[in-house]
Image (cartoon, rainbow, N blue to C red):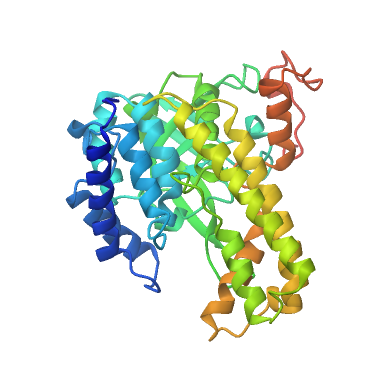
């Protein structure tokens, strides 16, 4: 990626170009779903504004990280139209760019960038959540193919995805963090079964995915054989940055805006206690934006983000917990139950219900604190009782 510094005139011209596109295509109140997200992303690609920092030869715009920052700053002022692509673009795309072969990039990047295809991530299993390395899904080599068997769970948008990136155990004789490999899987391949997990809010965002003798071409291996934990760690870092620094092109306070609107509806915006709570959320979100902007500025093109990404991810979860408490104080039961015809009020309840997932997705708060303590602050690591033990000899809760 070219990182030539832009002049003030170039920056303003590009910002104007972004705002013009967003004014035309990111309409307030427009229904947002997968179909509209794909349509918006396609128009973005046609305008040369998709995949800004990715090479032109793979469907990107071939521009700089400064262009990316300017786009994020402009987009933060408009309705979010492509939130459902956070995994496809925030995690799978950079993984393919960093660890994929030239053939992978030629085959997959352009369609991913333009939204013609959507990707999902398949890590968690019934017995491998926070401890992802305990995964039991296995891939066995059979000539020019891999045969995949096992189960993944909590897979976001698996039912809408065309492809997925999966980690599977390829050598149980090695320790649990070794003997793992990463693959590209076609989500409609024979033997792939996707079962929805129905949510309390009526949505269908997560899924269980079962694999029964699914055949994967040998060249769908990403990175090194039996060294998939390295790629898995990199992908988790990308995930934490994507979650913790969403909209980090500028300073923004989206949860404050939702709470302020709720306080006005309740006639409590002049209540000194409520005003203090609102400013607390405002200050927290401002701080998070600054941390996220620093994290993204430290990322090099094509290089995996470091453990500092866990700071934004954890703080985002802390804000969600506090947001939920304030929302319940302002709106009471109305913070979680509402008349479906009141679309304005639904913004508050959607955020409240969704806030519980923020302390789990991308690694629990406890995992983030461990990472920050170990890899950022240099504190001693927790004692591990399975060090040096082959995976096949471990006693896991989901094995006999």
Say above or below: 380 vs 283: above
Q: Quadrant of the C terminus?
A: top right
Residue 83 at x, y percent in the picture: 44, 56
Q: Could you tell me which residue is drawn at 63 percent across and 81 percent down?
A: 265
Residue 155 at x, y percent in the picture: 53, 50
Q: Could you tell me which residue is drawn at 38 percent across and 71 percent down?
A: 28
Say if residue 116 shows up in the picture. Answer: no
Which residue occupies the foreground of this view, 380 or 186?
380
Say above or below: 348 vs 338: above
Residue 314 in the figure: left or right of residue 64: right
Residue 268 at x, y percent in the picture: 71, 77
Q: Could you tell me which residue is drawn at 43 percent across and 54 percent down?
A: 76
Residue 117 in the figure: left or right of residue 199: left
Q: Quadrant of residue 382?
A: top right
Which residue occupies the foreground of this view, 338 or 74?
74
Say above or below: 206 vs 190: below
Residue 359 at x, y percent in the picture: 68, 48
């Amino acid at each position: 990626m070219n990182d030539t510094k832009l002049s003030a005139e170039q920056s303003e011209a590009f910002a104007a170009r972004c705002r013009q596109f967003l004014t035309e295509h990111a309409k307030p109140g427009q229904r947002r779903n997968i179909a509209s997200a794909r349509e918006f992303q396609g128009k973005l690609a046609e305008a040369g504004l998709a995949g800004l920092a990715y090479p032109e030869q793979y469907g990107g715009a071939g521009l700089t990280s400064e262009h990316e920052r300017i786009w994020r700053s402009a987009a933060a002022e408009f309705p979010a139209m492509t939130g459902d692509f956070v995994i496809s673009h925030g995690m799978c795309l950079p993984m393919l760019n960093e660890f994929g072969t030239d053939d992978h990039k030629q085959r997959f990047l352009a369609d991913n960038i333009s939204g013609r295809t959507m990707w999902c991530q398949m890590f968690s299993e019934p017995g491998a959540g926070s401890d992802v390395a305990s995964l039991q899904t296995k891939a066995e080599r059979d000539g020019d193919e891999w045969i995949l068997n096992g189960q993944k769970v909590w897979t976001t948008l698996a039912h809408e995805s065309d492809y997925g990136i999966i980690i599977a155990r390829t050598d149980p004789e090695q320790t649990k963090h070794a003997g793992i490999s990463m693959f590209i899987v076609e989500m409609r391949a024979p033997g792939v079964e996707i079962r929805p997990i129905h949510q309390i809010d009526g949505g269908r965002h997560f899924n269980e995915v079962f694999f029964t003798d699914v055949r994967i071409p040998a060249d769908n291996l990403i990175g090194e054989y039996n060294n998939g934990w390295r790629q898995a760690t990199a992908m988790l870092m990308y995930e934490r940055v994507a979650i913790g620094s969403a909209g980090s092109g500028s300073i923004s306070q989206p949860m404050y805006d939702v709470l302020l609107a709720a306080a006005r509806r309740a006639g409590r915006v002049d209540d000194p206690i409520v005003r203090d709570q609102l400013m607390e959320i405002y200050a927290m979100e401002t701080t998070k934006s600054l941390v996220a902007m620093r994290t993204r500025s430290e990322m090099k093109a094509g290089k995996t983000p470091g453990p500092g990404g866990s700071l934004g991810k954890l703080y985002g979860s802390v804000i969600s917990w506090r947001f939920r408490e304030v929302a319940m104080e302002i709106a009471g039961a109305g913070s979680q139950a509402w008349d479906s015809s009141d679309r304005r009020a639904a913004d508050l309840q959607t955020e409240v219900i969704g806030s519980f997932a923020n302390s789990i997705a991308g690694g629990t708060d406890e995992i983030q604190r461990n990472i920050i303590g170990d890899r950022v602050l240099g504190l001693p690591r927790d004692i591990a009782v399975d060090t040096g033990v082959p995976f096949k000899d471990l006693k896991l809760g989901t094995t006999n």
